[in-house]
Each structure stands twice: as C-alpha cells, then as structure tokens.
Image (cartoon, rainbow, N blue to C red):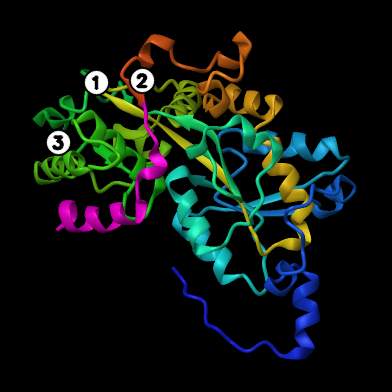
C-alpha cells in the first residue's frame, strides 16, 4: 500500500482541486441534500471505480442500467483492489479525488466510516435494511454470498462435503484460499470457518486453530486462487463465495470442465458485500447519491440475483424474486447450514493481525 505524502497546497492550485471535487469542495458540498438528477448523466460520463469490476456480481449491468435511466452512458473503468486498499486509496486521493465507488466486504464498512472517507449520506432505500447492514452514511449492504467449496471434480473424485473433510490427507496441497491478511474474501472465509467450528463474531479462535492445522498438514496450496488454477487442477479445491463458484462452474462447463459448488454441511454464514461512495469526489456527488440508492432498488437487486448472488433485501424477506432470477442459485436446501450473523461486529483489521500471528507464524 502506498502512503500519502502530505504537502502544502499552493493557493494557485486550490481552485483547480476544488473544481474536480477536492477535500476543500467536500466542505462546501451538501451531502445531506437529495441528488440533483439532472446532473447524473454528465457526472457519470466517466466512472473510475475501485474493486467494483463489471464482471463482479453483475455490476457491469447494474451500472449500465442505472446510467441509462438518466440518458447517460458511463464509461466504467475499474481498478482491482481489496477493501482495505480502497479505503487507503480514497484517503490518499482526498486532495484530488479520482475513485467514485467501491464494493467492500461489509466488515470494512465501519472501518471506512471511522477513517472518514465516506459521506454522511444514506439513500432513502437504506430504510429497507437492518441497522447493522448500513452505516450512519456512505455505505450499504448490497448482496450476500455464502463461503463454499468450489471443486474441480475431474481432478477430485471424492469432493469434500464439510470443513472437517478438508483435514483429510487426501486433499494435501490441493486447497486454495484468498489470503485473509490482504483479502476481504479471505477474511469472510475465516469468519465462516469460525462459526462452523463453534465460534462467533466475538470469537474467531476456532478458525485460526483450524487453518493452522491445514497449513501444518501441507493442505493449503501456495498456488493463487483463480478460475485458471481451478481449471488446470493446480488448486482443484478453492474456498470461495458460492456465487463466484457458480459463475466459474458455468464458464468452465463450456470448456468441458466439471465443477461442483458445495456448501459445507457443518456450517457457513451469509457474508454481505456492500457499496461505499467517496466523500471527497463531490464533483460526482449527485451521481453517487443516486447510485447508492439504486443498488437497493428492486431492479438492481434482481440483477445481482441473476448473476447468482443473493440480494440483501431477499435475505431480509423484503423482496420476492421471480423464479428466473434465481435460476443460477444452488437449490434452497443446500443453504440449510448457513447462518445469518451481524458480520459488521467483526474487526477485519484484527483478522489481518491474527492470521499472521496465529496461522502463518
């Protein structure tokens, strides 16, 4: 991560920075006001995002559909980042903001709020969420995924069905996970393993004990977790979100590669993703207010569902989806072991420290 170097901004450049949405402008812009919809098309003409890729949970179609509502086009260009990197980047650019919106693991919502990079703005649609699924401003839950096993069954003839199964010697060197020291996805897998092992949002100890066993047994692969390594069998068992696994299953089926997505029978959790918007990018403030409201609309929530992710409002019982929107989901009975937890009670920065101290050490 790059750390921002503070410098005195010359008076001659202050106007230019304010014009493009700088921190000086942030003090003048009224985040509490409703968005001026007449400005949305122009403000969204170019849309640089961080960690909000068009192929992530159908965000490409979500953004495109939102922009079309206001006769806009939106040249959406994303830079891949972790949740922690997104927060650092928003802060580092505060005097000359570029990034607009980011997808975050919901554990990072309170961190973003504490760091002061999101505005004190909640859209009207946030009223449909539970208290822990939104901040005081600037971020809301969007959809949820369940940590699952994504298995290339051409390479693994006896796929694991539970977390305990993964400890079997037959899976040595075959299991990949995103690094919880740097990845929000990896951190969600830690929480799921903890709850499955008898822990809670207040006690993740069972997860560290569990992953330490996997590491010491040589079961965890050093190979990068990706669709490519899944396909090649370099890491034929990957611990990932169910909706990511379902997308990979569909893509690899076209290549005659067989993949199974398995919810562990001994437990998993609903782990929400969220959207946060950049407080400092006031030049695009009306667009960002509108987008933050739109991602919780019936239309956007259904677009997430069609990808395979479960919309947060559907989880809450506030949205009834048509059958075709759920066509890419696993059968409902597969999710019987999945628990809903208040994941925003988990401190992801502590997971980073504990993973390095209790698993990697």
Indicate the position of residue 283 as horizontal and vertical percent values.
Answer: 78, 62
Is 60 in the magenta? Answer: no
Circle 1/circle 2 CB separation < 8 Å? yes
Q: Quadrant of residue 90 in the image? A: bottom right
What main secondary structure does the magenta stretch of the protein show?
Answer: helix
Viewer-closest of 239 and 97:
97
Q: Quadrant of the N terminus?
A: bottom left
Please name the residue that numbered disc 2 is placed on. Answer: 260
Compared to residue 228, the image places residue 330 above or below, namely above
Q: Quadrant of residue 334 in the image? A: top left
Circle 2/circle 3 CB separation < 8 Å? no
> Element at badge 3?
loop
Please name the residue that numbered disc 1 is placed on. Answer: 159
> Element at badge 1?
loop
Circle nearer the N terminus (2, 3): 3
Distance CA(mark 2)–CA(mark 3): 19 Å
Q: Would you call the spot at circle 3 few (<14 residues within 10 Å), some (14-19), or many (20 or more)?
A: some
Instruction: Indicate left or right for 76 with 329 as reference.
Output: right
Please name the residue that numbered disc 3 is placed on. Answer: 172
Q: Which residues are magenta?
A: 340-361
Report the disc number at residue 322. Answer: none
């Amino acid at each position: 991560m790059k750390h921002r170097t503070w410098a005195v901004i010359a008076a001659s450049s202050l106007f230019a920075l304010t014009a493009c949405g700088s921190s000086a402008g942030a003090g003048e812009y009224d985040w509490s006001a409703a968005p001026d919809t007449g400005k949305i098309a122009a403000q969204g003409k170019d849309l640089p995002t961080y960690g909000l890729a068009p192929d992530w949970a159908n965000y490409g179609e979500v953004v495109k559909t939102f922009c079309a509502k206001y006769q806009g086009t939106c040249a959406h260009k994303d830079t891949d980042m972790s949740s922690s990197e997104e927060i650092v980047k928003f802060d580092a650019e505060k005097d000359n903001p570029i990034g607009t919106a980011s997808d975050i693991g919901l554990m990072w919502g309170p961190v973003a709020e504490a760091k002061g990079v999101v505005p004190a703005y909640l859209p009207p649609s946030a009223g449909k969420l539970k208290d822990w699924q939104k901040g005081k401003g600037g971020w809301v839950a969007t959809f949820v995924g369940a940590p699952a096993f994504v298995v290339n069954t051409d390479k693994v003839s006896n796929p694991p069905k539970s977390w305990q199964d993964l400890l079997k010697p037959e899976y040595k060197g075959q299991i990949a996970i995103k690094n919880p020291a740097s990845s929000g996805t990896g951190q969600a897998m830690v929480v799921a393993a903890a709850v499955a092992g008898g822990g809670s949002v207040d006690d993740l100890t069972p997860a560290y004990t569990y992953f330490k066993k996997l590491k010491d047994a040589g079961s965890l692969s050093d190979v990068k977790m990706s669709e490519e390594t899944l396909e090649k069998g370099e890491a034929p068992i990957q611990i990932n979100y169910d909706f990511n696994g379902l997308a990979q299953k569909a893509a690899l089926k076209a290549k005659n590669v067989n993949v199974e997505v398995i919810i562990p029978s001994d437990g998993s959790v609903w782990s929400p993703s969220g959207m946060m918007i950049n407080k400092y990018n006031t030049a695009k403030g009306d667009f960002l207010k509108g987008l933050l409201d739109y991602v919780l609309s019936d239309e956007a929530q259904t677009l997430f569902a069609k990808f395979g992710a479960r919309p947060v409002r559907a989880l809450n019982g506030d949205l009834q989806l048509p059958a075709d929107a759920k066509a890419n989901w696993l059968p409902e009975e597969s999710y019987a072991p999945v628990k809903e937890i208040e994941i925003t009670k988990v401190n992801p920065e502590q997971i980073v420290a504990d993973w390095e101290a209790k698993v990697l050490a």
